[in-house]
Amino acid sequence: MKQFISFVIKETRHILRDRRTMLILFGMPVVMMTIFGFAITTDVKNVRTVVVTSQIDHLTQAAVERLAQSEYFTITKTVSTPQEAERLIRSQKADMAVVFAKNHSMQLIVDGADPNMAQQWTSYAQQTIVNGKSSIVNLKMLYNPQMKSSYNFVPAIMGMLLMLICAMMTSISIVREKERGTMEVLLVSPVRPLLVIIAKAVPYLALAFGILITILLMARFLLGVPLQGSVVWILTVSTLYIILALSLGLLVSSVAQTQLVALLLSAMVLLMPVIMLSGMIFPVESMPTVLQWIAAVVPPRYYIDAMRKLMIMGVGIGEVMKEVAILASFATFFLIVALKKFNVRLE
């Protein structure tokens, strides 16, 4: 056990000595949380709106006031014909036009260059006008009443960063020992080869926890994302996911012979599926059937789903047992395959 601990201390010191790597590892979560929390957002705010009305009565005036008082819309101009409003939109001087006809019907003319945002603008405008006009319609948003995009991005960033950092750093660390010829020396030591590999993974496990805590603190106190569920279960499921990512890193290291290959496999090959097929940005349910089948074997998808349920919805562990079981299966599979492929006598 003393020899195992000495291996862990050795690897920890090696990590701490590399200050640039430490800066990248802890700087990356801060930068990404800041970018996704404040810069990259799908929140609807300050939509430049043109009002088209041939006559002003109390109903039309009330609807216009509701739009003006809303934080989502900014009334930039009032015109008399839809053609004038369309010209303003085409010239990029407005995003949306609300047309009030004489029979009190309403038409929305929207810049559809970005279909996702256009759909949100339309939905928000209808809700703003209709909810104020009639007491029959009452909209209630569960879990995210302010419709903040950070509620959606934070669990996704956790899934992406933990997967990339754990898999990438673990694989590069082991392959570096291969390149230098020191891995063979370690494997002929009195410590069993399996314990040598575990000893090299332990510091990255602790490092991943530090990154996880950093993300959770920034989410709670900087972005205002609530932790509705049990923190214990959030950390427990995250631990399982970190072990999965470390196991994947071990698998990559057993295949790659150089640090460059390990970096490409762990970063490039993982990055695109995590972003495109995990539900981080695009809903999996909206993808073609073929891509949905491919997304089914992308582990971050299940971790992100579990974190959204635990953090945002505040459900219990029983509601995410399906995701936990799938993550456990992936982790077991990757670990078994990695250990079988790892050649003790390194050729």
Image (spheres, grey):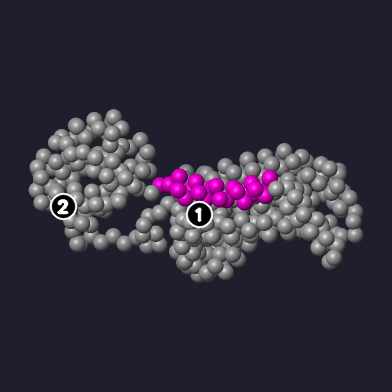
The residue positioned 28% from the left and 41% from the top of the image is 48
> Which element is circle 1 on?
helix
* Dot 1 alpha-carbon crowd within 10 angstroms: few under 14, some 14 to 19, many 20 or more: many
Above or below, 102 relative to 314: above
Residue 262, position as x, y percentages in the image: 71, 42
- The front one of 338 and 194 is 194
Q: Main secondary structure of the magenta part?
A: helix
Above or below, 125 relative to 192: above
The type of residue carrying mark 1 is Val
> Which element is circle 2 on?
helix
Residue 224, position as x, y percentages in the image: 45, 59
55 horizontally vs 306: left or right = left
* Dot 2 alpha-carbon crowd within 10 angstroms: few under 14, some 14 to 19, many 20 or more: some
Residue at the spot of label 1: 154
The residue positioned 87% from the left and 60% from the top of the image is 191
The residue positioned 34% from the left and 47% from the top of the image is 45
Residue at the spot of label 2: 62
Q: Which quadrant of the figure contains the N terminus?
A: bottom right
The type of residue carrying mark 2 is Ala
Tell me, yes or no, whether the highlighted magenta stretch contains residue 30. Answer: yes
- The front one of 344 and 140 is 140
Residue contact at pointers 2 and 1, CB within 8 angstroms: no
| Residue 295 seen anywhere in this rendered image of the structure | no
Residue range corresponding to the magenta coloring:
20-42
Q: CA distance from mark 2 to mark 1?
A: 38 Å
Residue 315, position as x, y percentages in the image: 48, 67
| Residue 178 seen anywhere in this rendered image of the structure | yes
Q: Which quadrant of the figure contains the C terminus?
A: top right
Residue 196, position as x, y percentages in the image: 81, 57
192 horizontally vs 85: left or right = right
- The front one of 195 and 331 is 195
Residue 44 marker: none
